[in-house]
Amino acid sequence: MILATGLNNPRLPRAFTLIELILVLALLVIITSLAAPAMARFIRGRALDSEARRLLALLHAGQSRAVSEGLPAVLWVDAKKNSYGLEAEASGTDGDPKAETLLVDATLQIASESGTAGEASTFKNLPAIRFLADGSVDENAPSALRLSDGEGFSRWLIAAQDGSGYEIRDRQN
């Protein structure tokens, strides 16, 4: 009587050996170690881009709010607390019920860059972008807002030349 084994009988499936499994796992480790740095750069870039788009959206909201309410709106930046927000400038004694405060992603820092030699626009002793009732940006507003990560990569929100708003760029100039 002949025993039916996987080697002699083609109908039975052949199993993987331990050596084959170890080789496959070693290949997976090598591929993962090569892909990990690229994934880290991708994730870092996503955090910067996402925060820049969120800040730009708040800038647009402030501009729209100033026009719709006919009152100046202010977007302030607090680099020490790593936050920014939007508030009506002429809010009453109760404060602004529509005010928003947002925290920057923990891996990023925010800063304002003033390009004017004159007096910079402030709100509650913080650098601020003031949107006038006609939707334009105050001439004393910061020329740029910078979002940066710990490795030196940055996204800039640069004031448009015509004073109509801001745009996202990879460089300051």
Image: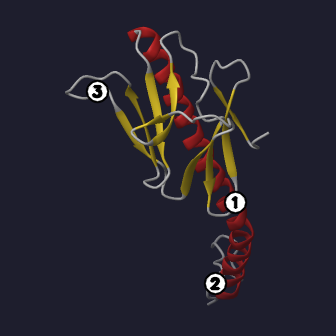
* Nearer the observer, 78 or 169: 78
Q: Which numbered disc, 3 or 2, marks the residue that appears first in the sequence?
A: 2
Separation of disc 1 and disc 2 at Cα? Answer: 62 Å
Disc number for residue 96: 3
Circle 3/circle 1 CB separation < 8 Å: no
User: Where does the image place residue 129, in percent across and percent down from the top left?
Assistant: 53, 30
Q: Which residue: 55% across, 43% down?
A: 51
- In the foreground, 88 or 58: 88
Measuring 51% from the left and 21% from the top, which residue is drawn there? 131
Disc 3 residue type (three-letter): Asp
Residue appearing at x 47%, y 10% in the figure: 67
Q: Position of residue 39 (x, y in %)?
A: 67, 59
Q: Residue at x 62, y 83 (%)?
A: 4
Q: Judging from the image, what secondary structure is the residue with disc 2 in?
A: loop
Secondary structure at numbered mark 3: loop
The crowding category of the residue bearing disc 2, from other C-alpha atoms within 10 Å (few below 14, some 14 to 19, many at least 20), is few
In the rendered structure, find residue 5 and report the number of the disc placed on it.
2
Quarter of the figure with the C terminus: top right
Q: Nearer the viewer, mark 1 or mark 2?
A: 1
Q: Residues within 10 Å of mark 1 (few under 14, many from 20)?
A: few
**Amino acid type assigned to the residue bearing label 2 in the image:** Thr
On-image quarter of the N terminus? bottom right
Q: Closer to the observer: label 3 or label 1? A: 3
Nearer the observer, disc 3 or disc 2?
A: 3
Does dot 1 land on a helix, a strand or a loop?
Answer: loop
CA separation in Å, label 3 and label 1:
36 Å
Instruction: Residue type at mark 1: give it.
Output: Gly
Question: Does 75 sit above or below residue 61?
Answer: below
